[in-house]
Amino acid sequence: MLARTNVILMADDDADDRLLAKDALAEARLEGEIHFVENGEELLDFLQRRGTYANSSVSPRPGLILLDLNMPKKDGREALRVIKSDPDLKRIPVVVLTTSKADTDINGLYDLGANSFITKPFQFDALVKVMRVIGDYWFRAVELPGSR
């Protein structure tokens, strides 16, 4: 695995979901760093290295963003729109990981540039499998920009 791209940034306002994701990533044996933010504004601050995240040692460039949709301040749709319109950020893969199954969400998010859409599983074992697949695909199978 490439350490440079093996950084995951997860934006989710639910503390329980963040903890479950962290545990599932560990159980899936995905090595690397995971960072968490709680809303779309904090996500953009992290990515654009503003405020608390101004120091790059606190906010390394992620190789993958896991994005929830329904968050306070700036929701996932708004954050995705900004990310995919920013020349410095648009190549970072964004996987929408949400409870939604709505066709309008799925279609709209792909139109905004989401790289994948995954409905969050309710059981921990299923979440571990999803995290394993995400890690295998995004950090082992594909070539990401800047990974060499």
Image (spheres, rainbow, N blue to C red):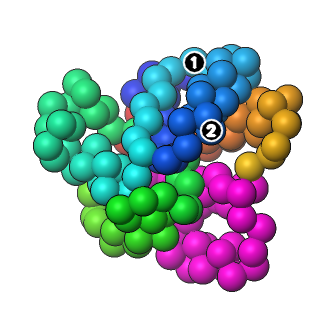
**Which one is in front in this view, the residue at disc 1 or the one at disc 2?**
2
Q: Position of residue 44 (x, y in %)?
A: 30, 54
Q: Which mark is residue 31?
A: 1
Structural crowding at the residue carrying mark 1, measured as other residues with C-alpha within 10 Å and reported as few (<14), some (14–19) or many (≥20) = some
Q: Amino acid at mark 2?
A: Asp
Q: Position of residue 86 (x, y in %)?
A: 29, 66
Q: Give the magenta range.
A: 91-119
Query: Residue at position x 65%, y 75% from top?
Result: 105
Q: Residue 96, relative to residue 9: is it above or below?
A: below
Q: Position of residue 10 (x, y in %)?
A: 49, 41
Query: Residue at position x 58%, y 73% from top?
Result: 109
Q: Amino acid at mark 1?
A: Glu
Q: What is the quadrant of the C terminus in the image?
A: top left
Q: Quadrant of residue 81?
A: bottom left
The residue where tag 2 is placed is 17
Distance Cα–Cα, label 1 vs label 2: 19 Å
